[in-house]
Amino acid sequence: MSIQVSFAQKQVQTDSVLIEGHYRTFHFLKAPKPGAMLIFVLHGSGGDGLGNRKGAVKLEEQQDAENLLIVYPDGYKRYWNECRKTAQTLANKEDINENAFFEAMIQYFDKNYQINTKQVFAVGTSGGGHMAYKLALTMPERLRAITALIANLPDTNNIDCTEKRMAIPVMIVNGTIDTVNPYEGGEVITGGISLGLVRSTERTFHYWADLAGYTGSPKKELLPDTDPNDHKTIERYTYKAKGKPEVTLLKVIGGKHDYPNDINVYLEALAFFKRQITP
């Protein structure tokens, strides 16, 4: 009950920006003071910004203490134009300019709410994870770090973004028995729409690790199994070295196309983001 009350008390504002003839809408919670960390929370394919909010309630509970400006953007007709070339969505077919949308939002929040433009982050689920990858691939200079939940990079024959190939901190949270975003790679089908082939989680993880200049094996940790009833366990693999971006994978053994109960993925994302700005 306390979570529901806390969730209901948060005052969401809605606005839009005009991007190439389309009004792109976003919903947000104002930060308590200037200089805030900006976090984009990105919905999955077929979803919308406000519908994604309930899953991030624990993140909202940290807003005042951490001085967060939390933004829930809406995709174009419920989908993002991320980097999957063969995606059968209107956002992809019409080649919607997502980079211009996110740049406009960053400028909007800088102008109106004086955010810290060096602390802009994105956490996305499924198709929103793909959108987070796109931001890291195509405008990494504007993002401090990203977290992708239940999402793999498009395969090399299914990517239509121009990659800047700039190292950036990335955290991935993927389930090993996910049939929508296959852990071992393959075709993604959701809502009857094919979004094309994706790489395996290992290839996705090592794409970012290789960009950051890591070699050898990552550090491996087994996280506490705080909810044995969910039949999932989590292994954390981390590349972290001074002067290099952190690249981390949370491998959810037995995880499907959902969130594990042993951790709160949004609090994990926040902790990851905070590590990237702590000396």
Image (cartoon, rainbow, N blue to C red):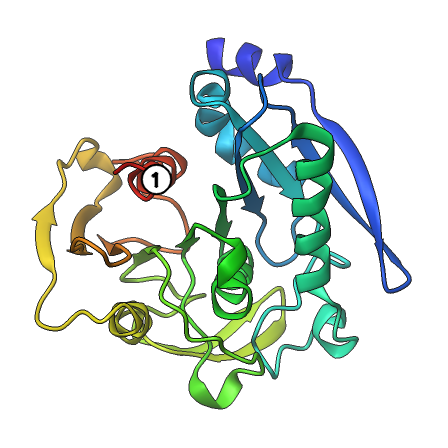
Q: Is residue 196 above or below residue 259?
A: below
Q: Is residue 101 toward the left or the right of residue 248 in the image?
A: right
Q: Residue at x 25, y 68 (%)?
A: 209
Q: Is residue 144 toward the left or the right of residue 72 in the image?
A: left
Q: Which residue is situated farthest in the right direction here?
A: 21
Q: Nearer the viewer, residue 192 or 266?
A: 266
Q: Is residue 227 above or below residue 180?
A: above
Q: Is residue 158 visible?
A: yes
Q: Nearer the viewer, residue 205 or 139?
A: 139
- Where's residue 233, x and y in %? 18, 46
Q: Quadrant of the C terminus?
A: top left
Q: Is residue 75 visible?
A: no
Q: Residue at x 18, y 69 (%)?
A: 214
- Where's residue 194, x and y in %? 59, 76
Q: Secondary structure at mark 1?
A: loop
Look at mark 1 in the image and give the residue it sits on: 277
